[in-house]
Amino acid sequence: IFLDKLIGEPVLTVITVTVGLSFFFKGCVELIWGTDTQVFTPAVFPLEPIRIGPLIIGQVYLWSFIAAIILLVIFVSFFKYTRWGLAMQATADDEMAALSLGVSARFVYATAWAIAFMAAGVGGTLLGNINGLNISVGFLSLLVLPAVVLGGLNSVPGAIVGGIVIGILQNFCGAYLDRYFPGGVKEIAPFVFMAVFLLFKPYGLW
């Protein structure tokens, strides 16, 4: 209904509309399900942690990591080896050139948003298994921005490296800086790092 009308419009217009839609959907979720945290009952993954020598790993983190890797392989294969995936890459690179070659921009955008919704649903489900599900889970998706900016917007290896670096940075800041600067250093650190990084490497590592 909304995004179909935005094909060919400036990126800022698309961002503005989708941000507005996100507020609308958030309001719908609060109206229908409320703001209380919903816990998965029974738990999807066993609560008993796995011990590997001195390491103690929660099964929910381990299985979430495995699921993320499987999805990553599927997405990379889709974009690299299928006709639809190549059409999406071409449209992202140069929309007018892709249109001139017969690629349907309307179909590409519909597919891209369908994949994005599916990935967000899987991610939300995995996060819900870890801390319960509430309206604030959506804000965790903002951490994708520093990870992608660090690695490079069009690079899958960059996204992997960026995600790992941002995750390690966030946890180190939480462990060592929260005692000196109480009040959420762990949540702010990735964005401070991103702002500084952009000054020196605006297009990311790749």
Image (spheres, grey):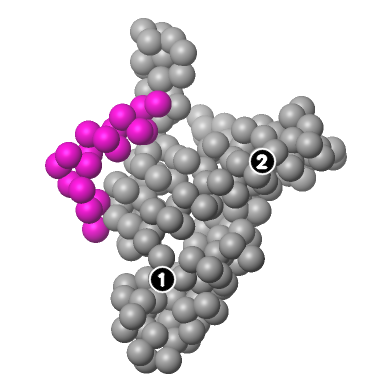
103 or 203: nearer the viewer: 103
What residue is drawn where x is 17% and y is 39%? Answer: 199
Q: Position of residue 67 (x, y in %)?
A: 60, 56
* Observer able to see residue 64: no
* Observer able to see residue 184: yes
What residue is drawn where x is 53% and y is 68%? Answer: 5
Element at label 2: helix
- State the mark number for residue 118: none
32 or 175: nearer the viewer: 32
Circle 2 residues within 10 Å: few <14, some 14–19, many ≥20: few
Q: Magenta: predominant secondary structure element?
A: helix
What residue is drawn where x is 65% and y is 44%? Answer: 24
Residue assigned mark 2:
26
Residue assigned mark 1:
8
Quadrant of the frame with the C terminus: bottom left
205 relative to 48 in the view: left or right: left
Q: Position of residue 78 (x, y in %)?
A: 50, 76
Residue found at the far right of this picture: 42
Circle 1 residues within 10 Å: few <14, some 14–19, many ≥20: few
Provide the residue span drawn in magenta: 188-206
Q: Is residue 205 part of the magenta span, yes or no?
A: yes
Q: Is residue 155 part of the magenta span, yes or no?
A: no
Looking at numbered disc 1 in the image, what kind of residue is underneath it? Gly
Nearer mark to the viewer, of 1 and 2: 1
